[in-house]
Image: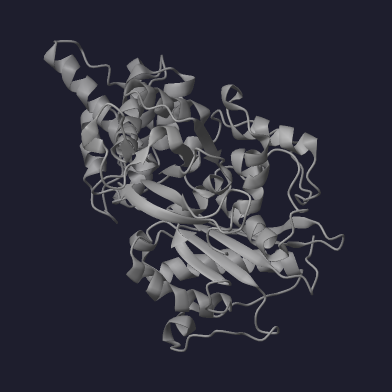
Amino acid sequence: MAAQKTSKLHVCIDCGGSKTVAVISNLSSEGEAIVAARGTSGPSNYKDNGVHVFLNAIRTAVQSALVKALGRSVELPVVDDVLKEQNSITSYSQESSHLYSAWIGASGIDATQDIRILEPLLSRLLRVPLTSQRLVVANDSYILCSPLLSCPAPIENAIVAIAGTGSVVVSFRREGGSTDDGNKSITQLARAGGWGHLLGDDGSGFFAGREAIREVLREFNLEELEGHTPSSSPSDDTRKETLRSLLLSHFGLDSPDELFSVVYAPDGTSAAPHDGGEKKAEWAQVDRKQRFVSLAPLVFHAAFKLKDRTALRALRTSVGGLAAQILSLCRLENDPQTNIGRRVAVNTTVLCLGGSLFGVEDYRNLLLEELSSIELCFPHVVFVSDAAQEGALGALYKDLRSLSYVRTGPLDALELDPAHPSDNEVELEGLPRVAPSRSNDSRPKTAGPLSSSSVASFAQGLFPKKQEGNSSMQANIARSVFSLCFE
């Protein structure tokens, strides 16, 4: 459905370690708030990929979305030209600018200096004025803390935990105003992790893959130690599918001790093919980080489908690190040493989960089990699946400045759309996910007047059944997604 030519287009861009997603929102000819189009491209983690790849990924995703939204050919500025240009623009003509506002939430953007460098570049690339109301560049955790804006007292803090290709945990506090006015803002308090795969990324796809290899090697060493014949040959492993057999098959190996050749082979290695033929082994064609990340779907399959104990141990170790990081940001009633600094009280905090790995319900449950084991129980837990979509619709809502526009039905941020699985990060096909409560069709998602049925749907989609309540908070979330940046 092409957008009206006179309608303002708002874009939200979710930049991740595996994929870039751009979602454009606008008003339909009937005056309904809709998702006009979306576009995707490759990885755009700023730290991992550098500024050129970062900008190119955004350009590809946004340009694709604009073509669909406008129904005609669109050409954004070439990245090389953007990098050469020096002027910062505070206004663009309507003819040269297709977008009214843009919000970029990107992994790998952590320092104020990063934002200062990228703001003028993104302004020139997207042709969006460099003003606080029109262009916002922030870490991707900001978009995921949006439920905090609508939580009633006593909730005043949020902890965001993201688990995708990488991971990070960040705490926020709501400042000023009540949940019913427009004077609210979000302040980042502290963070844990988010240091990249070499130094951390606990609970991420990389970490899960690494722990899986470590567990297989530990098990292999233990069998040798205890005098058992290691079940390393294909004939032994193919009789029953296990984490070990999946890993060996994935890399084309016969024994766990051959995994070292995969783990330590340098990027762009010219390693000889396993079968002695001329074809280069597939794992040798990707960098070392992606060799680990590519194992995440196999580990999840082994743990949650095959109930493989080795895989479950790997995931418990992985998610345990993330739980420890969440704990480090919390103030504990029975520990006076934590009642200092910027730590937050658990009973006034909503836990917001994001990233493709948390799209798997069993993995979320593992995290909640780990948190419960250390006596950390949050009053509300929210899963945000489609950050770019929520940001785009939130931007449109802020521009309308009308309380009559709020989408009916379950909040899309809290369910996975089967048409766009794992838009944010690692692909995890065939695993249990949050079940969508609407039919899988291609019609634009619309908004309409708030009704009692929509409030009930929000309650069902937002919190676990044991935690339903306060319908006004749940109904307000769609309204406030973008207020933290476009206020």
Lateral position of residue 279 relative to residue 12, left or right: left
The image position of residue 404, as x and y in percent, is 78, 53
**From this viewpoint, which residue is outermost toward the top?**
227
Residue 360 can be seen in this image: yes
- What colour scheme governs how the chains and residues are painted in the rendered image of this protein? one colour
Q: Quadrant of residue 339?
A: top left
The image position of residue 433, as x and y in percent, is 57, 31
The image position of residue 341, as x and y in percent, is 27, 47
Q: Quadrant of residue 371?
A: top left
Height in image: 353 above or below 198? Answer: above
Residue 253 can be seen in this image: no
The image position of residue 150, as x and y in percent, is 59, 45
Q: Residue at x 40, y 58 (%)?
A: 45
Quarter of the figure with the N terminus: bottom right
Quarter of the figure with the C terminus: bottom right
Depth order, front residue of 142/474: 474
Lateral position of residue 132 relative to residue 294, left or right: right
All told, the count of numbered labels is 0
Depth order, front residue of 118/133: 133
Depth order, front residue of 381/279: 381
**From this viewpoint, which residue is outermost toward the right?**
30
Q: Residue at x 76, y 38 (%)?
A: 454
Q: Residue at x 61, y 35 (%)?
A: 462
Depth order, front residue of 36/260: 36
Height in image: 147 above or below 306? Answer: below
